[in-house]
Every structure is written in structure tokens, then in C-alpha cells.
Image (spheres, rainbow, N blue to C red):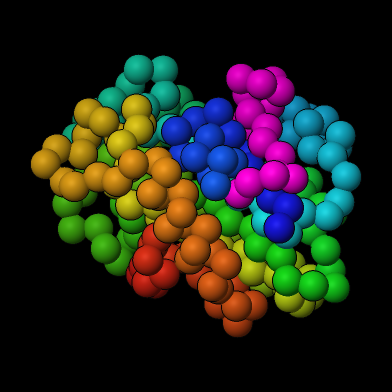
Amino acid sequence: MRSLIVGASGGIGAALLKACGDGSVGVSRRTDGLDVTDEASIARTLGTLEPHFDRVIVATGALEIGGIAPEKSLRAIDGSNLARHFALNAMGPVLVLKHALRLLPRDRPAHFAALSARVGSIGDNQLGGWFAYRAAKAALNQLLHTAAIEVARTHPQAVVVVLHPGTVETGLSGRFRGTRAAVTPQVAAENLLSTLDRLAPSESSGFFDATGARIPW
């Protein structure tokens, strides 16, 4: 199974690339100069690739951008920080889908997934705070949900979803996971691939955790 991992130099991305095995391709800012906040960079990087990929997984994202920690109150909201989060955590993955769609086969099963986060669930939000990250992930969920409806018209066997990897031992979550149990990137990658590969076209446009359970929007 041929896979493309976008964000392959990060903790989860590198583990996904390794778990996908031979024939898979990884691209990232570190190795390819890919900037998912710049559509021209996405088009240039993905434009060098040839079809077909059975899986495309976007493992980019950040909880802190420019050293700004997640907001704890309304007073801490900053417009420029909101914009940076939307550019990286919401717009980036859907722009990857826009330019990666030509890489997916139309006549057989294919999977596209972007890593979201449970904190992006509006229905599951009981704590507040983390405005920029929550809102960007909620926007990502809506963007991919909407895109999946269109993709189904041209790629009827495709699955387009957002996935929550759980709490993972990476630099992204290290300072914020507290006492919550965490899994290694390798375990997270295996769980994500197992879940993704089990999903059928009828489940496209959904939001799932790493066990395959649906998360409320």
C-alpha cells in the first residue's frame, strides 16, 4: 500500500512514515521546504509526485506558534495568533487535499486523513480556553467534512476523515498533557493506520479517535 505522509519530520508523522513501510513517501518543511501555510509551496511540492497513493495523511499542526501558549481567558486572545493557527491548523490540510486529490485513484479505495484534536469538538468542550487551537481544529473539521462530500462525487470509493491521535509523547503535547496517560508516536501511528484502513466510504466525512470511535462535532 503506497502512502504519502505530509509532515513526515514530526513525531507522529515520522512514525507514520515508518509504519507505512516501503514505497511510501514523506514530505515536510525540514526535508522539502514544504510550508502548508503557503499554497504555492504545497502545489510545488506535491506537483513533483506521481499518482497513485492509496493513503494521504496530513500530520502537520502546532499547539504553540511563535512561543505563544494556549489562551486561558478572553483577555489573552490575540488576532494575529488566531490567524496563524487558522493558517497552519485549518487551512493547511485542506489545501493539501486540494492539490493531493489528483494523486488519489478514482477506481479503487483510497484514504485521506488529517490529524485533528478532540479539543476541536464543540460538543465535547466543557472546559473552555485554548481559543485559537480549538477554533482552528473545529474549522479543520468543517473544511474536511465539506470537502469529503465533494470528493465522493469523483472518487466514490474514497474516505476523507479527520482523526484524533490521542495523547502522544511528542513535543507538541509534552507541557500540556499533565497526568494523562500518553502513547508513543509508534503506537499512535499503528492505531491511526488501523483505524483509517477499517473505515468504509460510507464513513467518509467523519471525525474519529484512534480506536475508531466517533467524536461529536
Q: Magenta segment range? A: 20-37
Residue closer to the observer: 169 or 209: 169
Q: Residue furthest bottom?
A: 202
Query: Left or right: 56 with respect to 48?
Result: left
Q: Is residue 30 magenta?
A: yes
Q: Is residue 121 magenta?
A: no
Q: Which quarter of the picture shows residue 110?
A: bottom right
The percent coordinates of residue 94 (x first, y second) are 64, 49
* Quarter in which the C terminus is drawn: bottom left
The percent coordinates of residue 57 (x first, y second) are 61, 49
* Quarter in which the N terminus is drawn: bottom right
Is residue 88 shown to the viewer in this render? no
Residue sitting at x 76%, y 49%: 100
Residue closer to the observer: 96 or 20: 20
Is residue 132 shown to the viewer in this render? yes
Relative to 185, say whether 205 is above or below: below
Residue sitting at x 49%, y 63%: 194
The percent coordinates of residue 135 (x first, y second) are 40, 47
Query: Left or right: 132 with respect to 46?
Result: left
Residue sitting at x 57%, y 67%: 197
Q: Which quarter of the picture shows residue 179?
A: top left
Q: Residue furthest front?
A: 22
Query: Left or right: 73 with respect to 123?
Result: left
For the image, the number of numbered tags is 0
Relative to 217, say whether 13 is above or below: above
Residue closer to the observer: 109 or 64: 109
The percent coordinates of residue 136 (x first, y second) are 45, 44
